[in-house]
Image: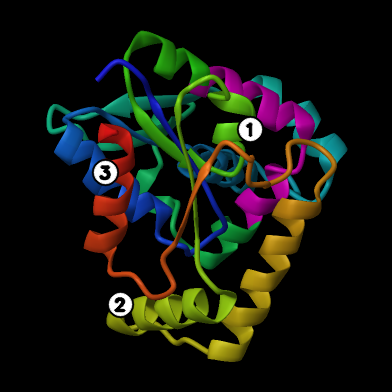
Amino acid sequence: MKYSIAIDGPAGAGKSTVAKLAAKRLNIPYLDTGAMYRAVAVACKRNGVDVSDWDAVRAFLPHVDIQVRYTEGGEQRMIADGEDVTHLLRTEEISQGASLVSMIPEVRDRLVQLQREVAHRQAVIMDGRDICTNVLPDTPHKFFITASAEERANRRVKQLLEQGQPADYETILTDIRRRDRQDSERAYMPLVCREDTVRIDTTDLTIEQAVETLLSEVRE
């Protein structure tokens, strides 16, 4: 595997699941870039920094150390100031916080640099919002994985219920649409689908079908 694989797409489209499975098939590391923004949001919360206050986040950023580490089994772990915070990343509060801090240019610049460093060392598959457009624009393997907002809301409801957590479809749908607007309308590094990117709509696809679609394109 000579080239890294870049995947962009909105929240809940299945891109992380597809990326993880494809990474296993190709025997290359998977880098969850969204987890990096979540780690920044966790660090802000733990230090009393308001993620909606750009100036406060900018002032705090030089004082937090964010790192990516992998276990012997290849599992990605997020480290903030020397502590593994991976188990704190997947709450709705942190999801919203990550979306907010990702709008701050200084945050994106710092994490993009870290993402490029990982890709420079080895071939990887990574997903996010600006991987194809900004992080790895020169890779020949660029994908945009999406799904309808309604389908993404249904998936999130199912996931929460399986975890024994309350889930309101309309609330989740509204939140997904809000995050889509934030990601696509932000002035700096917005979520867009490049013309040279392969678009995969997973609305009516199984995960296995989506993975096979991606892998067939890579093999070609």
Tell me residue 104's x, y (percent).
Answer: 77, 37
How far apart marks 3 and 2 lie (CA) works out to 33 Å
- Is residue 142 left or right of 101 when viewed as pictured? left
Three-letter amino acid code at the position of disc 1: Thr
**Which secondary structure, mark 1?**
helix
- Is residue 59 left or right of 25 when viewed as pictured? right
Within 10 Å of the Cα at label 2, are there few (<14), some (14-19), or many (20+) other Cα atoms?
few
Q: Residue at x 63, y 40 (%)?
A: 195
Q: Is residue 109 magenta?
A: yes
Tell me residue 81's x, y (percent).
Answer: 49, 26
State which quarter of the image contains the N terminus: top left
**Which secondary structure, mark 3?**
helix
The residue that mark 3 highlights is 216
Q: Residue at x 30, y 77 (%)?
A: 163
The residue that mark 1 highlights is 133
Does residue 14 lie above or below 155 as drawn? above
Three-letter amino acid code at the position of disc 2: Gln
The residue that mark 2 highlights is 163
The stretch in magenta equals: 97-115
Tell me residue 159's x, y (percent).
Answer: 35, 76
Prevalent SS, magenta region: helix
- Is residue 55 left or right of 94 when viewed as pictured? right
Name which of mark 1 and mark 2 comes first in the sequence: 1
